[in-house]
Image: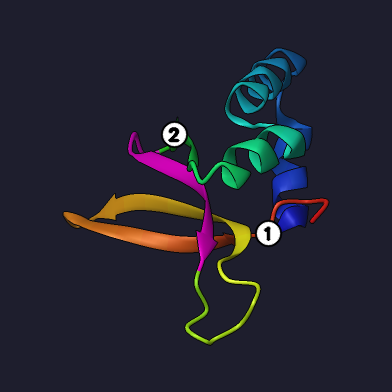
Amino acid sequence: MLDRVKDILAQLPERDLRALAEHIDAVLVTDEEAERVVSRGERLAATVTDRKGGTVTYRLERVKCGKACKGCPHGPYLYKYWREAGRLRKGYVGRPSGR
């Protein structure tokens, strides 16, 4: 999938690449900001508009594993939320880099 994204980006004019980079910078946060927010128990969220005009919200969350372990809650992990056919959907994106 990453190769497909690279191919698409290679075809974009420089003007569009700069606009995309600015948009990404506006919705992303640094690992330090994320760690500060998550360590205070807050949820970090960024909402973006997808190509179909819908919105996708990305959130850092700590999750409980359901076991009696010392590390709960675990994370933070990145999840995305979107609406599909009137229902709220949730998908695991991954662990932020540097973790």
Vertical side of 95 occupied by 34: above or below: above
| Few, some or many residues within 10 Å of mark 1 (<14, 14–19, 20+) | some
Of the 4 image quadrants, the one containing the N terminus is bottom right
In the displayed structure, 61 sits above or below 71; it is above
Which secondary structure lies at badge 1? loop
Label 2: element kind: strand
Question: Quadrant where the C terminus lies?
Answer: bottom right
The dominant secondary structure in magenta is: strand
Q: Could you say where residue 25 lies in the image, as x and y percent from the top left?
A: 67, 23
| Residue name at image x 72 percent, y 22 percent | 17
Question: Which quadrant would residue 16 be assigned to in this image?
Answer: top right
Residue at the image position 46 percent from the left and 62 percent from the top: 91
Amino acid type of the residue tagged 2 in the rendering: Thr
> In this view, which residue lies farthest toward the top?
15
Tell me the tag on residue 95.
1
Look at 33% across and 38% down and name the residue there: 54
Q: Residue furthest left?
A: 86
> x and y percent of residue 3 in the render?
77, 55
What segment carries the magenta color?
A: 52-63
Q: Which residue is mark 2?
A: 47
Q: Position of residue 27 (x, y in %)?
A: 58, 28
Instruction: State the colouring used for the structure image.
Output: rainbow
Q: Give the residue drawn at x 62%, y 46%.
A: 39
The amino acid type of the residue labelled 1 equals Arg
Q: Please, is residue 96 above or below residue 51 in the view?
A: below
- Is 20 a magenta residue? no
Q: CA distance from mark 1 to mark 2?
A: 18 Å
On the image, which quarter does residue 35 sit in? top right
Q: Are marks 1 and 2 in contact (CB under 8 Å)?
A: no
Q: Depth check: give the residue in front, 56 or 17.
A: 56
